[in-house]
Structure formats: structure tokens, C-alpha cells
Amino acid sequence: MFDVVCAVIMDQEGRFLVCKRAEGKALAGSWEFPGGKVEADENPQSALQREIMEELACEIEVGEQLPAVKHHYPEYSIRLLPFICSINSGEPTALEHTKIMWATPDQCRSLKWAPADVPVWTALFSS
């Protein structure tokens, strides 16, 4: 099992930044909160800052950690560590995703999500 981090970024209108996985990647076409793997020499917060810079070309502030999600795919298992984040600088740009968008909770409910992300948004929108 390896650790993966994701950023839950909300704008001032209550929309969430969501990303569509690119063709050729695992779970292509699925939506997710942006993030990625934690490397051996990183803590989750610094990994998330690095991943968001690589994927979206912006700097974030990492805030509160949400409950971790363990998910077992056929080939591997992950522990997803979601964090509430805010953008410090830059405008999110899709560098590694097919598409990014600011989605309302209702729009999020209608998207085809990567399975590990489902418990994250379900917990967010049920509170």
C-alpha cells in the first residue's frame, strides 16, 4: 500500500477544483481531486505542494487533513490522504489532465469519479 495525497480546493463561490484523468493513464476519463504519490523522502504536505505545482502550475497552502481513505484496486492498494487547500498563487492550468473545472457539489455528484475519491467528496457534501 502506498500513500497518495489530494487537494480539496474550494473557490469563493463554493465550487471545487476537479480534474479529469488523461487518456493513457490508469482510470483515464475519471474525475479526481488533484494530487499524487508521496515519495519516500517527502511528508504528505510537501508532496501535495509539489504535485499541484507539477499538475496545475500553482502554489497552494495545505490546511486541515481529512480522514484517510484506503482503496484496493486490482493491481495495487492506496491510502488516499485528502487535505483542504487554498491557492496561494497562480491560476490552475491542466498540465497533466484532459480537463479541469470548478464544479458545484451537484455537478460533482454527477461526475464519473476515480473510486478512491468517492468517499472524499461524499464526506464533504454530507456534512
Image (cartoon, rainbow, N blue to C red):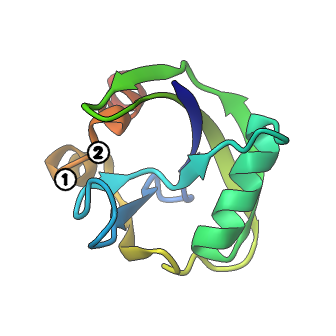
Report whether 36 appears left or right of 122: right
Q: Amino acid at mark 2?
A: Ala
What number is the disc on residue 111?
Answer: 1
Residue at 54% across, 81% down: 93
Q: Position of residue 39 (x, y in %)?
A: 72, 44
Q: Position of residue 78 (x, y in %)?
A: 47, 29
Q: Position of residue 108 (x, y in %)?
A: 27, 49
Residue at 72% across, 78% down: 90
Closer to us: mark 1 or mark 2?
2
Q: Position of residue 55 (x, y in %)?
A: 58, 70
Q: Is residue 39 visible?
A: yes
Would you place residue 123 above or below residue 6 in this image? above
Q: Between 78 and 118, which is closer to the camera in this rendering?
A: 78
Residue at 71% across, 30% down: 64
Q: Between 65 and 50, which is closer to the camera in this rendering?
A: 50
Would you place residue 106 above or below residue 124 in this image? below
Report whether 68 appears left or right of 42: left
Q: Amino acid at mark 1?
A: Leu
The local crowd at label 2, few if under 14, some if 14 to 19, many if 20 or more residues have their Cα within 10 Å, is some
Local secondary structure at mark 1: loop
**Quadrant of residue 49 in the image?**
bottom right
**Quadrant of residue 121 in the image?**
top left
Q: Is residue 81 visible?
A: no
Q: Between 116 and 88, which is closer to the camera in this rendering?
A: 116
Q: Which residue is mark 2?
A: 114
The local crowd at label 1, few if under 14, some if 14 to 19, many if 20 or more residues have their Cα within 10 Å, is some
Q: Between 11 and 22, which is closer to the camera in this rendering?
A: 22
Local secondary structure at mark 2: loop
Quadrant for the C terminus, please.
top left
Report how far apart the C-alphas of labels 1 and 2 lie in the structure: 10 Å
Which residue sits furthest front?
Answer: 75
Residue at 26% across, 54% down: 27
